[in-house]
Amino acid sequence: MPDKVTVATTWLQGCSGCHIALFDLDEELLDVLEIIDLKAAPVMDVKQLPDVDIGLVEGCVANDDNEEVLKHMREKSKKLVALGTCACFGGICGLRNLYHLHDVLERGYVTTESTVDGHIPQSADIPKLKEYVRPIDQVVKVDGYIPGCPPLPELIKEGLLALTRGELPEIKTRNLCEECTRKKSKMLTATRDYLTAAVCSPNELEEIDPHVCFLEQGVLCMGPATREGCDARCLHGNMPCRGCMGPTPDAQEQGAKMINALSSILPAGALMFQEDVVGVGYRYSMPVSIFPHLSNKKKE
């Protein structure tokens, strides 16, 4: 019997949801373990990370400890794979990049409404926060990507099986609208009229047709700016896409792509009345946008 492919996993800044998604394979995880030998994971008591064929990294780089753990995993892994949207694009944690580090710490420890006599903690035992949150490929070389918040368990399985065959996980190139089965009659019809007067949240409507495109119903959906691959799982529950699969490979500016899509269906000026265009459009991909680089340049 040939030797199994050795695998190690770790998590950085994030929520551990990608590891939970791995365990959500349930009985199918046993099939995967027939092929791989899991040498190390955050839930295992491993003191020293061994050399492995594949390293899976969940989470983004937000502090010095994250960077040290990531670089060590890179050294020990023949192939390194970004697992989940935080590792691939920075994720929700990356929205911190909208603010300067001092302002973030000040708000977190001093000016919150429930804080009395607060102060920013200083200790050698506390990992120092980075000025900006980064996806892991901005720190080390990454060989493959499995996006999603969290990724579908079957996507993790497919990615692992591909790696055991010497291949890399498939990178989807189309947007979610290509995968969505909802009717798009108005969206595909050339007209001089705008499709809707405004876009809103699902809770602002009394009823949403589960068979019709969300945007045609005036509901904000990130499908046009988000890569396919998630089986449109949120849409099956009659909830619009929020962009967790990240941007398509040829359009890293996910927020700008969404604004472009909305500008073709909304009257001029309508976007001015959206409360958080940046927070919605870049919810999962701020660190791979051009914004942090512009902010760095301005500071210099």
Image: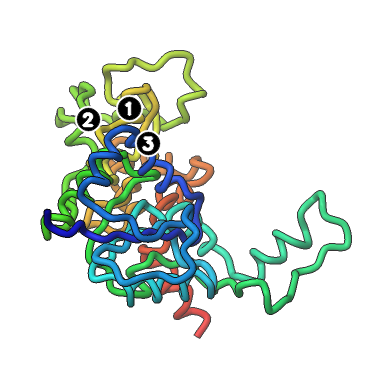
Q: Disc 1 to disc 2, how far (Cα)?
A: 8 Å
Q: Is residue 153 above or below residue 256?
A: above
For mark 2, what is the residue?
A: 180
The residue beneath circle 1 is 235
Q: What is the three-letter code of the residue carrying label 3?
A: Asp
Location of residue 269 by image quarter:
top left
Quadrant of res 75: bottom left
Residue 85 shows in the view: yes
Residue 240, horizontal then vertical, whole percent:
37, 31
Q: Quadrant of residue 38?
A: bottom left
Give the numbered dot on residue 97.
none
Mark 1 touches mark 2? (CB < 8 Å): yes
Which mark is in front, 3 or 2? 3
1 or 3: mark nearer the eye: 3
- Image position, residue 290 (x, y; %): 37, 67
**Residue for badge 3:** 24
Label 3 vs label 2: CA separation? 24 Å
* Depth check, front residue: 120 or 294: 120
Residue appearing at x 40%, y 57% in the figure: 58
**SS category of the residue bearing label 3:** loop
- Please state which amino acid type lies under the numbered disc 2: Cys
Circle 3 crowding by C-alpha within 10 Å: few under 14, some 14–19, many from 20: some
State whether residue 12 is above or below residue 188.
below
Dot 1 or dot 3, earlier in sequence: 3
- How many residues crowd around disc 2 within 10 Å: few (fewer than 14), some, or many (20 or more)? some
Q: Secondary structure at mark 2?
A: loop
Three-letter amino acid code at disc 1?
Leu
Estimate how packed mark 1 is, as few (under 14), some (14 to 19) or many (20 or more) residues with alpha carbons within 10 Å.
some
213 on left or right of 84: left
